[in-house]
Amino acid sequence: MFIMGLAVATVLFNVVGQDQADLLKKQVQRFEVVFNMASDFAILNQQQLGLYVDQEKNSYSYLILDEEQKWQNFAVDKVFASHTVPETFGFELELNDLPWETDGSLFDEEVFDEQLSVSEDGVEI
């Protein structure tokens, strides 16, 4: 009975492990496809899109910058609606194989004393 129990536990462990790997692969593929679709939409329509990650809800959604320069939910299609990722997975942002760092940002209060203004005429600080 003990040997049969070990065999069943091993099979169950392998099945559960494989399911998690497949689920992760599907989540990554979904993210990649939808991200590329959003990028194509932004380029074709000359719009600025953003990605919002809610770590508390373990979800992400797409945003669009409106005419008043405020971010709004991007809901042209259900594909771009907020998507919740299973709890076993999380998010980590890396740029060019480097982790995202907020220290030393040009927009830190210690770097600029005044507001940064960007317009078609130029940049004013």
Image (cartoon, rainbow, N blue to C red):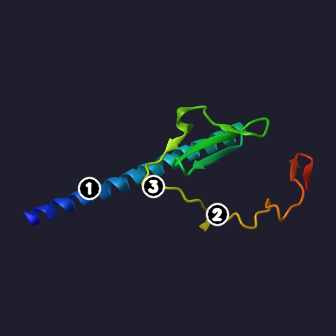
- For badge 1, the amino acid type reads Val
Q: Is residue 38 above or below residue 92?
A: above
Q: Is residue 64 above or below residue 17?
A: above
Return the residue nearer the eye: 11 or 114. 114
Q: Earlier in the sequence, mark 3 or mark 1?
A: 1
Q: Which residue is mark 1?
A: 15
Quarter assignment of residue 97: bottom right
Q: Which residue is mark 2?
A: 100
Residue 111, percent across and down?
A: 84, 65
Q: Earlier in the sequence, mark 2 or mark 1?
A: 1
Quadrant the N terminus occupies: bottom left
- For badge 3, the amino acid type reads Phe
Residues packed near mark 2 inside 10 Å, few (<14), some (14 to 19) or many (20 plus):
few
Q: CA distance from mark 2 to mark 3?
A: 19 Å
Q: Earlier in the sequence, mark 2 or mark 3?
A: 3
Residues packed near mark 1 inside 10 Å, few (<14), some (14 to 19) or many (20 plus):
few
Residue 42, percent across and down?
A: 67, 41
Q: Is residue 28 above or below residue 3?
A: above
Residue at 51% x, 42% y is 83
Q: CA distance from mark 2 to mark 1?
A: 35 Å
Q: Which residue is mark 3?
A: 89
Quadrant the C terminus occupies: bottom right
**Cβ atoms under marks 2 and 3 closer than 8 Å:** no
Q: CA distance from mark 3 to mark 1?
A: 18 Å
- For badge 2, the amino acid type reads Trp
Residue at 53% x, 33% y is 78
Q: Secondary structure at mark 2?
A: loop
Residue 14, percent across and down?
A: 26, 60
Residue at 88% x, 50% y is 117
